[in-house]
Amino acid sequence: RLVLSSVSDYFAAMFTSDVCEAKQEEIKMEGIDPNALWDLVQFAYTGCLELKEDTIENLLAAACLLQLPQVVEVCCHFLMKLLHPSNCLGIRAFADAQGCTELMKVAHNYTMENIMEVIRNQEFLLLPAEELHKLLASDDVNVPDEETIFHALMMWVKYDMQRRCSDLSMLLAYIRLPLLPPQILADLENHVLFKDDLECQKLILEAMKYHLLPERRTLMQSPRTKPRKSTVGTLYAVGGMDNNKGATTIEKYDLRTNIWIQAGVMNGRRLQFGVAVIDDKLFVIGGRDGLKTLNTVECYNPKTKAWTVLPPMSTHRHGLGVTVLEGPIYAVGGHDGWSYLNTVERWDPQSQQWTFVASMSIARSTVGVAALNGKLYSVGGRDGSSCLSSMEYYDPHTNKWNMCAPMCKRRGGVGVATCDGFLYAVGGHDAPASNHCSRLLDYVERYDPKTDTWTMVAPLSMPRDAVGVCLLGDKLYAVGGYDGQTYLNTMEAYDPQTNEWTQMASLNIGRAGACVVVIKQP
């Protein structure tokens, strides 16, 4: 009794306190596997324990009951090593039932990470509906698109159609139907499983409206319109000014893991350049190398990590704005080493050539550009005498620029991105050319093209000049920048629904003027 009491709080309470078992010669143990109990009694005397795959769960259950923390820990680590797509759901449920939080967490994360293999296994098809709904509701399942999760649900239902049809509308509410392609939604409406189920029909109609009325999407937001983290793509931060006079590294950020990792290296130093994405490749355009202004263009394939040299622009440009509009890439304004530019060039991916289009009404360097509703917007910048509050847009069908309402603040080094039909201008600086003591800005404002008006929204948590801004999923991300003292490695995300900025994972190095873009797959 002393030996057992020394290793187990359960036995210590039984033998040393005033309970009837303390005086009994023979004690009957209920709800415990006899072989596991024998192994644990042997362990109390010898300190040795043999772990086997086929008995480990009984052993862990017994160790939890008898309060043997060392054995519980060893068993949990043994089960962690056994995790596989065919057993992780079972191990997760078992850990939950035994109150083993660490094992539960590891098994849960393993399930989320490997969900594509998990859904092909028998364990998935045997899940009870209440467990399946937790999987379907999760933002963290590692799927390439929403279709994958929808097809997994259909597979689960068809496995036992008669019993499971009654759960269908409850489970379908956790599928983000508005994010499915319209072709799938059209087929669902008359699908035998859905056509007589009123709740399912409501969900399908909601999703169809989301596709039919894009201008009303801001009013249709719900948990079903929020993309899962793994489906939004990968955020890339390319180059930028750092403490070594210019970073050549490329980092990428995964929203699901909330981590930045190294993703490549540029062929040489570039500052104040531009980046655009076509076919999941990065096009790196212009800039300056510390000595001269560049017109060179290179293309980086993140899958193969290979660089290709492309035909150069006609004009050397740093401080230019770059974006894709309806296929071609536009290189807007900038500075050629002598003067501020109002000229604009367009790269045609088919002919692989640069051609000039209409020039802006104002020369702009450190300009922010973005495409919205088939138009190219050119925002703020500097014209040589001061920072600009003006904005103009280019219509590719008329080849003309038109002035818009000016911003509330003058901004050079401004970050620009679009979200839900609005254009956002983020951070930057305001200073006359002669005055090096710039005012750095934390202001953020939003432009509504329908009314041609600007509105101030929640400011950044700190001033950020030369900030990289990009839409990832349903939030805007402000990456790096300069606060007057430091090249920032911090990142914050703006939620238009709540009008709030939230701190996210930091870059590996501080960067100002990094080009920040999203690639859908890599």
Image (spheres, rainbow, N blue to C red):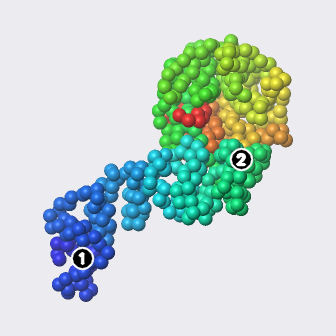
Task: Say whether residue 474 is left or right of residue 388.
Answer: left
- The image quarter containing residue 312 is top right
Residue nearest the observer in this picture, 402 or 226: 226
x, y percentage for residue 206?
73, 54
Residue nearest the observer in this picture, 200 or 439: 200
- Dot 1 corresponds to which residue? 12
Q: Where residue 186 is drawn, which disc sits there? A: 2
| SS of the residue under disc 2 | helix
Q: Where residue 309 is drawn, which disc sits there? A: none
| SS of the residue under disc 1 | helix
Around disc 2, counting alpha carbons within 10 Å, would you say few (fewer than 14), some (14 to 19), or many (20 or more)? few
**Residue 461 in sight in this render:** no
Kind of residue at disc 1:
Ala
Q: Is residue 119 above or below residue 302?
A: below
> Residue shown at 84%/29% (left/top)?
403
x, y percentage for residue 100?
38, 62
Task: Say whether residue 446 is left or right of residue 261.
Answer: right
> Residue shown at 49%/50% (left/top)?
119
x, y percentage for residue 495?
66, 48
Quadrant position of the N terminus in the picture:
bottom left
Q: Is residue 496 above or below residue 479?
A: below
Q: Is residue 455 above or below residue 364?
A: below
- Between marks 2 and 1 in the image, the one whose residue lies nearer the viewer: 2
